[in-house]
Image: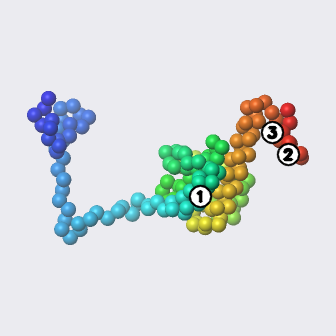
Amino acid sequence: MSRHADDPEIDKGNRGNILTIKKERPMPANNPEPQPDESQASRDDALFWDLALPLIAEGRVEEGTLMSSRCVRANGEFVALPEYRDGDLVVKLPKARVAGLIEAGDGLPFAPATKVFSEWVQVPARNEALWAELLDESIHFAEATSAKKAAKKAGMKPASKRTGRATS
């Protein structure tokens, strides 16, 4: 054991016997508090949770995680999450609806790590009515997706578009 093992200012690091001495620099008197880096966007997800929490309380969705972020799910299907940098609404919808929102200028392609998710759209404008509408659409989309998966698992064909009844 090193004679410096209990010294909190010494870090052995991952380089074996090489020791690095950690010294804290005093803050300049004219700048007592460090300022946040401008590259660190403040996450404003308050509107998302203002809309999601009543849905959770009603039992329409439950909280979960997606890509290490908090999200909401319905019937085990992902519904929406606040975008991890800015808190924008990120919502799962049918591909055609996503394309329509992007074309209308109401949404952006959702592309974490540069891969575009075709059934997801990012909605940056803080528009409570639009976000509530999209969350509701996404819940219905998740319920339909879940029902299709359940029918497929049970060996049933999806519901007929004409009759709306499942066939066996």
What label does residue 164 carry, if any? 2
Colouring used for the render: rainbow
How many residues crowd around disc 2 within 10 Å: few (fewer than 14), some, or many (20 or more)? few
Nearer-the-camera pick, 53 or 124: 53
Quadrant showing the C terminus:
top right
Q: Secondary structure at mark 1?
A: helix
Which quadrant of the structure image shows residue 6?
top left
Q: Eyeballing the image, is 61 above or below 149?
A: below
* x and y, in percent, of residue 101 in the image: 68, 60
Quadrant showing the N terminus:
top left
Could you tell me which residue is drawn at 18 percent across and 47 percent down? 22
Could you tell me which residue is drawn at 65 percent across and 57 percent down? 135
How many residues crowd around disc 1 within 10 Å: few (fewer than 14), some, or many (20 or more)? few
How far apart in space, not on screen, are marks 3 and 2 (Cα)? 9 Å
What label does residue 71 carry, if any? none
Which-is-in-front pick, marks 3 and 1?
1
Given the current orientation, which residue lies at the most extreme right position?
A: 162
* x and y, in percent, of residue 151 in the image: 76, 36
| Amino acid type at image mark 2 | Gly
Given the current orientation, which residue lies at the most extreme front position?
A: 58
User: What residue sits right under mark 1 in the picture?
Assistant: 54
Q: Secondary structure at mark 3?
A: loop
Could you tell me which residue is drawn at 32 percent across and 64 percent down? 35
What label does residue 158 carry, if any? 3
How far apart in space, not on screen, are marks 1 and 2 (Cα)? 30 Å
